[in-house]
Every structure is written in structure tokens, then in C-alpha cells.
């Protein structure tokens, strides 16, 4: 059995529900046929995430006395593919299968360290139904089904995108933000309207994270801890004392949508030119390829980030203007990027608004976010989320706007 570190994976204090301006939570007796609180009167959900290369398990508790949600544990393991390679479904599935049981044990042990039967506290098991990679999704869904049958507690099928949004809203106390969802497999600008999260703009080809990851492989950056983060480190070499060279790249915004595939092809072609100095330094600019025309790996990483993030900021601002909202929430793995947060914060501040941003604990795929969305579905009796065993087939295509958000008022009011 794979062992995991005993260090704490949940350090945040309880998050109050009042700032979210959701609907009032029905009393558990209203859905007594679906679930029941534990002996302490608390509702606890275990969430399992495995849509891509991260396998995570989180335990989330709702305390009716304090009206707060608290993450009790949130361990995860990441499949890091060899340098120059992406993560493939088969190998990623094997990784999740090897680690999911140990993660479940670690999550329950951290949440209830002095209890030999921690499963007795659980009200439900939540798992990622989609979207994502088929093999990894199924590997974690099987674990969720097994626990549900073993412990005789209900299953909650969660949309991965909705989970990112709801975890972000709770963690940042954002009631009704425009959401920029940026990850390895998704790029969407989202706002809530009439009972659903509506997609106002998105990528028409590849996701922003996929674009960054593929370029990182081209220039030989490591996948550890992630290729996108290593691009960010290269781009951070830009400073007033030694500025990096900005290389003009295609800027492709089509209405409210963005496109990255042509930009990726263009920048990949630049790495084949004689002016490109791989992993070069400032002193390498002289001599080869005409001096000032030279550019390095850091130059291209900096230029790629600036171009892509400017595109994302533009369509986010347009959504804010259209919806009349003044706050932005960034979710998804790419949302950890400090430069993206800085650019978005500048734009939002110019509009007199606020930016709601998070770090890697909740931006990157994790089990707690699945538990959080599952908790909402459980407490409000979502018919689409509380599924029977025969309806737990995972799907790689599951749109954000397919989910009825029953925990929020259908009509946006002053605080909705």
C-alpha cells in the first residue's frame, strides 16, 4: 500500500455561508429519504477527484450551529509524466488506481484522527462525473461506487467545472462574480443567470493550459511540478534591471471567444529559427543570428504569457461590462499564475471592482472542491446530482451550463 505524508492538508478556518447569498439550506428532515447528518448534527461529504493527472480526496463538513463549511482534509497525488511527454490516459489511470485507496485512508484519518471508524461520520460520497479523461475518471468513479455500496451512503455526481466555481466562491466569499475558468482542459468565461452558469466566452480549439504545457515540452521544460509553472518561472526573469525581449505573437480574440492553436504553431516555429537560443542568457544574444534579433527561452515564455493572458483579460472585461458585475473569480490550475492574477487585478481595479484569487490548494484539481459542489447538491436535493448506481457512467463531455444550480436564487437580486 502506498504511504502518504501525515502533514496537514487542510489549514483554512471554517468559511461562513452568509456572504454567498445562496438560498436558505432546507432542514435535513426535508430530504430524510436521501441523507442524514452524523451523530454530531453535521453533514460531511467525502469527495473524489480524478479527471486529469491529479487524484485527490477531500473531506468537507457543514456545521449547522456556526453555519460554516470547513475542509477537514484534502490530500492529493499528481502523476508527473517524463520530461518532453504529456500524460496519457492509460498511465494516468494506473496512477490513480495505485493511489486512490491510500488517499481515501489519509483523508479520513486526517479528518477524524482518533476514530477507528471515520466513515460513520459521512453523509455521502461525491465524485467527478465529467468532464475529463475517460480512464482516470472511471478509475476514481469505481472507488466512489465501491465506498457507496460498502458504507450504504448515497452517491453524488459532480460536474468538474461547477466544483471549481463553488469551491472558489466559498473560499473567497464571492457571491456573484464573473468566473474565469482556466485549466489544462478548459478555458471559459462564465457568469450566473437564471439558475445556471452561462458560458459567455471560451476557447474554440485547445485550452490555455494545454497550450502552455505543449510549449513547455517544445523548449524542454520539466513537467515537475507542472510545465505551466515552469513557464511562469522563466517569465519571471523579466524585471526592470534586465528586461526580457517581447516577441510579438498572434493575438486571436474572436468576439467573446479565444483561439490558441495558431499561436502555439507560430511560437513553436520560432524555436526552429537560428535566432532562438534555447535556455539562453543575456550574454548569448550577441554574435549568433544578428545580435538584437536573438531571443531566448525566457523571452518566449514571457511573450507567450503576456499575449495569452491579455486575451483572457479582454474577454473577461467584456463579460463584466455585459453583466454589470464588478468582481472576478479565477479558478482552475492556470489560475495559480501570479502574472495572470496581477493583470486581471489591474483591469478589475480600473473598473472599481475586486479580484477573487486563490493559490494552488484550491485552484489545482482537488477532492475538497468535489465535496463542496456535492455538499450543495446534497443539501438542496439536486435531482441531477443525487444519482442511482446505474446513472454513474462518467462522461468526457459535460458542459458547465448543463447543471441546474438549485442552491442559488434563479433571479439575480442585489446580493444574488
Image (cartoon, rainbow, N blue to C red):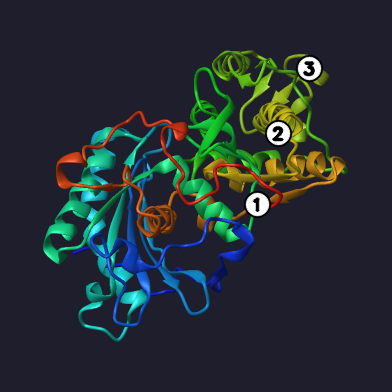
Spot occupied by residue 350 in the image (x, y as percentages of width and height): 86, 41
Task: Say if residue 225 shows up in the picture.
Answer: no
Q: Earlier in the sequence, mark 1 or mark 3?
A: 3
Residue 235: quadrant of the picture: top right
Tell us which disc is closer to us: 1 or 3: 1
Tag 3 residue: 293
The foreground one among 118 and 97 is: 118
Local packing at callout 3 (Cα closer than 10 Å; few below 14, some 14-19, many 20+) is few
Tell us which disc is closer to us: 1 or 2: 2
Local packing at callout 2 (Cα closer than 10 Å; few below 14, some 14-19, many 20+) is some
On the rendered image, what quadrant is the N terminus found in?
A: bottom left
Residue 262: quadrant of the picture: top right
Q: Is residue 10 above or below residue 256?
A: below
Do the residues bearing badges 1 and 3 touch, measured as CB atoms within 8 Å?
Answer: no
Question: What residue occupies the far front of the structure in this picture?
Answer: 30
Q: Secondary structure at mark 2?
A: helix
Q: Is 407 placed left or right of 313 in the picture?
A: left
Q: Is 211 placed left or right of 267 in the picture?
A: left
Task: Say if residue 78 shows up in the picture.
Answer: yes
The foreground one among 345 and 168 is: 168
The foreground one among 55 and 279 is: 55
Do the residues bearing badges 3 and 2 touch, measured as CB atoms within 8 Å?
Answer: no
Residue at 41 percent across and 70 percent down: it is 61
Tag 1 residue: 357
Q: Secondary structure at mark 1?
A: loop
Tag 2 residue: 323
Q: CA distance from mark 1 to mark 2?
A: 20 Å
Tell us which disc is closer to us: 3 or 2: 2
Local packing at callout 1 (Cα closer than 10 Å; few below 14, some 14-19, many 20+) is many
Q: Is 113 placed left or right of 19 in the picture?
A: left
Amino acid at each position: 500500500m502506498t504511504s502518504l505524508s501525515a502533514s496537514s492538508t487542510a489549514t483554512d478556518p471554517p468559511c461562513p455561508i452568509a456572504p454567498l447569498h445562496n438560498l436558505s439550506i432546507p432542514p435535513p428532515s426535508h430530504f430524510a429519504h436521501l441523507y442524514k447528518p452524523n451523530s454530531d448534527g453535521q453533514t460531511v461529504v467525502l469527495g473524489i477527484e480524478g479527471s486529469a493527472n491529479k487524484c485527490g480526496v477531500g473531506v468537507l463538513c457543514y456545521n449547522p450551529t456556526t453555519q460554516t463549511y470547513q475542509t477537514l482534509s484534502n490530500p492529493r497525488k499528481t502523476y508527473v509524466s517524463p520530461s518532453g511527454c504529456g500524460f496519457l490516459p492509460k498511465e494516468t489511470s494506473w496512477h490513480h488506481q495505485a493511489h486512490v485507496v491510500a488517499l481515501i485512508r489519509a483523508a479520513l484519518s486526517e479528518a477524524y484522527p482518533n476514530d477507528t471508524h471515520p466513515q460513520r461520520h459521512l453523509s455521502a460520497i461525491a465524485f467527478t462525473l465529467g468532464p475529463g479523461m475517460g480512464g482516470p475518471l472511471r478509475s476514481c468513479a469505481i472507488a466512489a461506487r465501491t465506498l457507496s455500496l460498502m458504507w450504504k451512503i448515497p452517491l453524488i455526481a459532480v460536474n468538474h467545472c461547477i466544483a471549481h466555481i463553488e469551491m472558489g466562491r466559498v473560499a473567497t466569499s464571492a457571491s456573484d462574480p464573473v468566473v474565469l475558468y482556466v485549466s489544462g482542459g478548459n478555458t471559459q468565461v462564465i457568469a450566473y443567470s437564471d439558475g445556471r452558469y452561462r458560458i459567455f466566452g471560451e476557447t474554440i480549439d485547445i485550452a490555455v493550459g494545454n497550450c502552455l504545457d505543449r510549449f513547455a515540452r517544445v523548449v524542454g521544460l520539466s513537467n515537475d511540478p507542472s510545465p505551466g509553472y515552469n513557464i511562469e518561472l522563466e517569465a519571471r526573469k523579466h524585471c526592470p534591471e534586465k528586461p526580457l525581449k517581447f516577441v510579438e505573437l498572434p493575438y486571436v480574440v474572436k468576439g467573446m471567444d479565444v483561439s490558441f492553436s495558431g499561436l502555439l504553431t507560430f511560437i513553436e516555429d520560432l524555436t526552429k529559427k537560428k535566432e532562438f537560443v534555447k535556455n539562453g542568457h543575456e550574454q548569448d544574444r550577441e554574435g549568433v543570428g544578428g545580435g538584437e534579433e536573438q531571443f531566448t527561452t525566457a523571452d518566449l515564455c514571457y511573450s507567450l504569457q503576456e499575449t495569452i493572458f491579455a486575451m483572457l483579460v479582454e474577454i473577461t472585461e467584456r463579460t463584466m461590462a455585459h453583466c454589470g458585475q464588478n468582481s472576478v473569480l479565477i479558478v482552475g490550475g492556470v489560475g495559480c499564475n501570479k502574472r495572470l492574477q496581477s493583470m486581471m487585478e489591474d483591469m478589475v481595479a480600473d473598473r472599481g471592482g475586486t479580484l477573487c484569487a486563490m493559490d494552488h490548494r484550491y485552484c489545482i484539481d482537488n477532492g475538497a472542491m468535489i465535496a463542496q459542489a456535492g455538499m450543495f447538491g446534497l443539501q438542496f436535493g439536486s435531482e441531477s446530482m443525487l444519482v442511482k448506481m446505474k446513472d454513474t457512467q462518467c462522461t468526457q463531455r459535460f458542459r458547465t451550463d448543463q447543471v441546474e444550480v438549485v442552491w442559488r436564487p434563479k433571479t439575480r437580486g442585489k446580493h444574488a
